[in-house]
Image (tube, grey):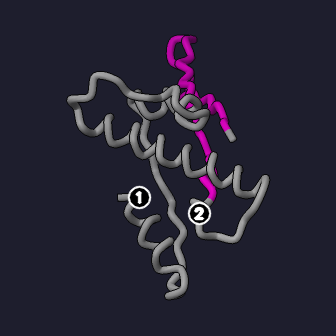
Amino acid sequence: MQNTIESSPREEKNGDEDVTLSQLNLIDLAGSESSKAKTTGLRRKEGSYINRSLLTLGTVISKLTDGKATHIPYRDSKLTRLLQSSLSGRGRISLICTVTPASSNSKETHNTLKFAH
């Protein structure tokens, strides 16, 4: 969900009102899907797209923090194209990762925390 927020000071100064426009993106990245999961057909294909988008997002963030990268692959996924202005500008980004303490999901939890790092 993409929201544009318009804010202005409570009191006008000299009749000129300064308006600030901000953009708020709320994105559910979904879970990464393991190829070992017993999914077939459409669900398996959807899982492949999710994994590819997450991989591309990780690559873009890695290249942005590297400082030496000459090419940032924003166009490699719809997700990174949508987030390009937020990732490459003066924006602030917060990431909320949900994990489970269940030992049966320890690998997924580890991968989620590794991605967030």
Q: Nearer the viewer, residue 14 or 71?
A: 71
Q: Residue at x 22, y 32 (%)?
A: 67
Task: Say whether residue 102 is visible.
Answer: yes
- Is disc 1 surrounded by few (<14), some (14 to 19) or many (20+) residues within 10 Å? few
- Residue at screen point 41% across, 66% down: 113
Q: State which tag comes first along the sequence, 1 or 2.
A: 2
Q: Few, some or many C-alpha atoms within 10 Å of disc 2 (few <14, some 14-19, many ≥20)?
A: few
Residue 16 on the magenta segment: yes
Q: Position of residue 101 (x, y in %)?
A: 50, 84
Residue 80: where, in percent of width, then height?
Answer: 52, 34
Residue corresponding to mark 1: 116
As helix, strand or loop, the secondary structure at mark 1 comes to helix
Q: Residue at x 52, y 31 (%)?
A: 76
Residue at position x 42%, y 46% from top?
58
* Residue 26 covered by magenta stretch: yes
Identify the residue position indicated by label 2 in the image.
35
Work out whether 73 lies above or below 101. above
Q: Picture quarter containing residue 64?
A: top left
Vertical side of 113 occupied by 41: above or below: above
- Amino acid residing under circle 1: Ala
Seen from this angle, which residue lies furthest left? Answer: 68
> Where 41 sits versus 53, above or below?
below
| Total numbered badges shown on the rendered structure | 2
- In the image, is 72 to the left or to the right of 108? left
Instruction: State the quadrant of the N terminus.
Output: top right
Extreme residue in the top direction: 15
Q: Which residues are magenta?
A: 2-30
Q: Position of residue 7 (x, y in %)?
A: 59, 30
- Residue 117: x percent and y percent? 34, 58
Q: Nearer the viewer, residue 3 or 19?
A: 3
Furthest residue toward bottom: 103
